[in-house]
Amino acid sequence: MKPSPPNSLLTTRPPVFSAEEAQSLALQNYSLDVSAKPLDSERDQNFHLLAENGAQYVLKISNANEHPSVIDFQTRAFEHIAQCDPNLPVPRTIASVAGSDDCRVTDSNGIAHVVRILSWLEGVPIRKVSISPALLNELGNTLARLGKALRGFFHPAAGHELLWDLKNAAGLIDLLPHVEDKKLRAQLENVLIRYRDEIQPRLGSLRAQVIHCDLNPDNVLTGKDDTERVTGIIDFGDMVHTALINDLAIAAAYHLSPSDDCLSAALEFIRGYHSVTPLERGEAEILYDLMLTRLVSSVVICMWRAKIFPENRDYLLGDKAFARDTLMRLSSLDAQAQQRRILTLCGHDAMGSKAGKKGFGDIDSAALIQRREKLMGKAYRLFYDRPLHLVRGEGVWLFDAQGKRYLDVYNNVPHVGHCHPHVVDAIYRQAQTLNTHTRYLHQVILDYSERLLARFPGSLDIAMFACTGTEANELALRIARSVSGGNGMIVTGNAYHGNSWAISQISPEDEPASRREANVVTVPAPDTWRGDFRGDEQGAADYFANHVSAAIETLQSRGIKPAAFIVDTIFASEGVICAPAGYLLRVAELIRQAGGVFIADEVQPGFGRMGSNFWGFEAHGVIPDIVTMGKPMGNGHPVSALVTSFEAVDSFSKQSSYFNTFGGNPVSCAAAMAVMDVIEAENLQANALEVGKYLHQGLESMSRRHEIIGDIRGSGFFIGVDLVQDRHSRKPAGDEAVRIINDLKDRGVLAGRTGPHGNVLKFRPPMVFSKAHADLLLERFEETLRRNSYSIPHKQ
């Protein structure tokens, strides 16, 4: 179950428990005999608890639509803050009589709620005191300290959607009809449109982390007698992972004044924050706009909710008058002048500000390329005619240094999405606990091995670990040679299996025949669309399998005993080939008869990507002797594995031992375990099947309008689009594919090319790719083909 959509919490009625019920809950679940007094709240219900001995607490009854994982997110954050900065005045969770952090109760209507009790923090809300410059500076300082304490904190629910998060502010345009004052509505709309078009695209390239997200004057306490000291930060209900600058913008917005010098108080707040966490130039440039956006958010959301919950109208509209009046005054001011004041305070050149312009934060790509070649040499390659400088990833999106967002339809390494919070959290938690190698006992590798092996036929019952697909394939060669007593290798003609010397020998895509050793023989890929045989499937299977039989004979004629046939089961480098039924079964039979083994390289098609099967080999009805996997296994963390039989490893172990310093380390295994969690919890294999079919159908429809599309192949989230110069000859359109890939990139979509002729577009997105993302890909692809005049001419 996923956290609720951003609007659902704000449209669900808050809990309605009486003070007597709150007292009963505290007594039954926490053994606290207290009196209870209601406290104001937006979407939850809070009570101030007072015991006879003077002890005080806060009882929190969560909204029915608040997902338990989000509540756990807040609890774990309190623990993390206590470890990183124990002097920060934030609440602590009180354990129930059962020893848990919270408990579940139902109201009179049978609706379930999560109940927590937190420690009470002494002080008065700063809204009730006169705020001095010293307190403003201390407020900024404290917020920055809180941000630093949360900097390394991750949680699976950190990315939950929240309407109050400024990154979602553009969506508030849809709520503007709830603002009845036409003049005010027009001003609000102007701010939101500017935010949508100019500010939101920049957030993606800025620092991001978990933030408090709501340091308003009711959520900060100061001393009753010492009003220049912060004594409490409360209400972490809006905490979320978003741009770090949003935390400062939200808090500082409450200190914008409708007076002539609107920024005077806010600048002191910013100064205090900047003294602890210096603002980057890109953050300082958009801070003023973000503060205005927060004011708009307060007006729009509160007016919308006041209509839904008129009984809570006074509380909901508490800040509306301040925000409205401030906005009315600020609309007549020079926004760029205010931006320059912030830049100057933060030590940035105000005259060189790019605020309000697209392309901010640009870094000279030519200089980066020159520096890269100087430091790393020219053997490395870059994508695209104009290489991308990427700075952040999230889900199916990648962001460049200018804040432009790209739909990632190429990278299979972030299998469950870029920077998936659950995977990041697993890596973080294990890294702060233990990381060592496999010559010590540790349980994580065993737990993961059991989980991984459960995905294989019973005859494949041993797992061995490495860091990359190359390493896994090299280990597979060592085992194959040990088991077979030979060293002859058979691969398809344009295969790719890795980049070490041994594996480059069986990667003809990168290694020309002139540098290939005599023990490696290539065979044609079983391409029934462009290959030499295009007849029935049984005939095609026999035809291409006969090439393997001939390769075995070639090796034997050279005095070389065959060791293995290795194949990427989606034939990705061959152009995403759909092998004829029975081909791999026949090949496995042939290699085994010759004394060798059949190796399935699942680095690209594995872990549910094909939709219909978890592993690519399953689609062919064959059981390999060895299976290798890598890239997607740890969502970008360097981890790979080999799965084979006990008998094969037993034979290998009599001749060799195996050790890999980082292979199978606890952090890598935690990452891999988290990936498996996400695949299962989010039902991503089924998503690949459903959305993959949807995308395939959209491409089929497009092919009827564009003659350059010759064939569409693949399954699930691995689709190849074969581009041709004409459909009759099927002549590959390699140059056109290059242009299309670059044009797609310019339109915000990242795709790849593959195949011997470089003419097959490769669509291989992260597994969280949705139908909406598929629609965007199809739309941009259609635009690209129309622009380049690849459509089928109209016939009279």
Image: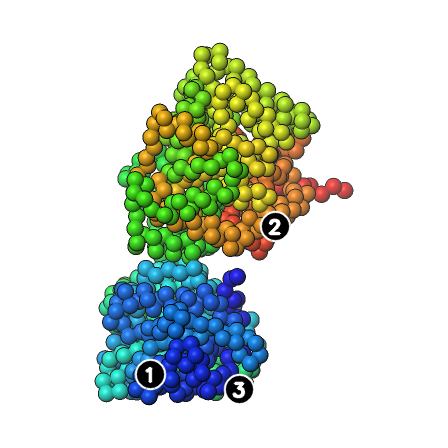
Image marks 1 and 3: residues in contact by CB distance under 8 Å: no
The quarter of the picture where residue 56 lies is bottom left
Which residue was labeled with disc 1? 56
Place of residue 116 in the rendered image (x, y in percent of width and height, measured from the top left): 41, 74
Q: Is 738 rendered above or below residue 317?
A: above
Kind of residue at disc 3: Glu
Place of residue 108 in the rendered image (x, y in percent of width and height, measured from the top left): 55, 81
Instruction: Tell me which label, 2 or 3, sits earlier in the chain.
Output: 3
Q: Residue at x 52, y 23 (%)?
A: 592
Place of residue 482 in the rendered image (x, y in percent of width and height, measured from the top left): 41, 24
Which residue was labeled with disc 2? 690
Judge left or right: residue 116 versus residue 736: left
Which residue was labeled with disc 3? 311
The one of 772 and 79 positioned closer to us in this rendering: 79
Q: Residue at x 27, y 64 (%)?
A: 84
For label 2, the SS is: helix
The one of 386 and 550 positioned closer to us in this rendering: 550
